[in-house]
Image (cartoon, coloured by chain):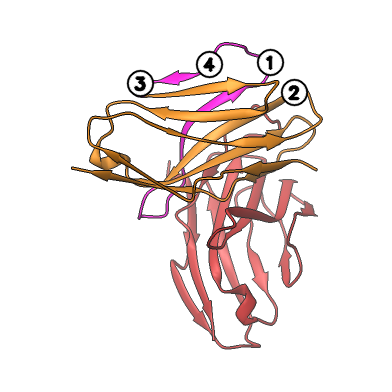
Amino acid sequence: NAGVTQTPKFQVLKTGQSMTLQCAQDMNHEYMSWYRQDPGMGLRLIHYSVGAGITDQGEVPNGYNVSRSTTEDFPLRLLSAAPSQTSVYFCASSLSGLFTDTQYFGPGTRLTVL
Amino acid sequence: AQTVTQSQPEMSVQEAETVTLSCTYDTSESDYYLFWYKQPPSRQMILVIRQEAYKQQNATENRFSVNFQKAAKSFSLKISDSQLGDAAMYFCAYRSASGGKLIFGQGTELSVKP
């Protein structure tokens, strides 16, 4: 099992550009989520999905879109990047959304918006 | 809404000594899970230990143990016989029984002195 994979590892964008951060898992997990990590603020939930075709907003969803067409993939889209979106992004998955399940994290993507 | 607070931005410990990282949380729920995650310089989020709120017995994983005080809403992590490889950012996290999302504290940066 590769676990949770994220691409790219690093990305630099100019303000207004769009891009997609990729996330995939091979553990047949139903629950997937995206977090951003900023200094002094821990990780904050952007969007999450409890299964293919189902997504919902987290704590900081503005400026981000997601879709879940398959169980394995959960891409995060930035439609018009802003400097405030400079952050480290983590994708995570768990077997279900039950609070008893352990979440597994990907290695992260460091995004810089100039 | 639930919140998690880590009041120690930085901690330092001598190799082979014991250190305790503090975490408090606020919730009105009775069922939930608490977690400690380790984030080394590689940025990967690694689960260290977890505690079920309905269990009075404190969780233990080798050199890592917790002091869970449900009434006080406190969840501290004790690292015994500290090793150089323990140096990392440590995050306390809460997962609600009513939803799958994780709520993180701000993190504590632990350094280990040889």
- The amino acid on which the numbered mark 3 sits, given as a three-letter code, is Asn
Could you classify mark 2 by the number of other residues whose Cα lies within 10 Å: few (under 14), some (14-19), or many (20 or more)?
some
Quadrant showing the N terminus of chain A: top left
**Chain for colour orange:** B
Could you classify mark 1 by the number of other residues whose Cα lies within 10 Å: few (under 14), some (14-19), or many (20 or more)?
few
Magenta segment: B40-63
Rounded to the nearest angstrom, the CA distance separating label 4 from label 3 is 13 Å
Rounded to the nearest angstrom, the CA distance separating label 1 from label 4 is 11 Å
Which residue is identified by label 2? B31
- Residue drawn at 44 percent across, 54 percent down: A107
**Chain for colour red:** A
- The amino acid on which the numbered mark 2 sits, given as a three-letter code, is Asp
Could you classify mark 3 by the number of other residues whose Cα lies within 10 Å: few (under 14), some (14-19), or many (20 or more)?
few
- The amino acid on which the numbered mark 1 sits, given as a three-letter code, is Tyr
Mark number displayed over residue B54: 1
Left or right: B68 in relation to B89 = right
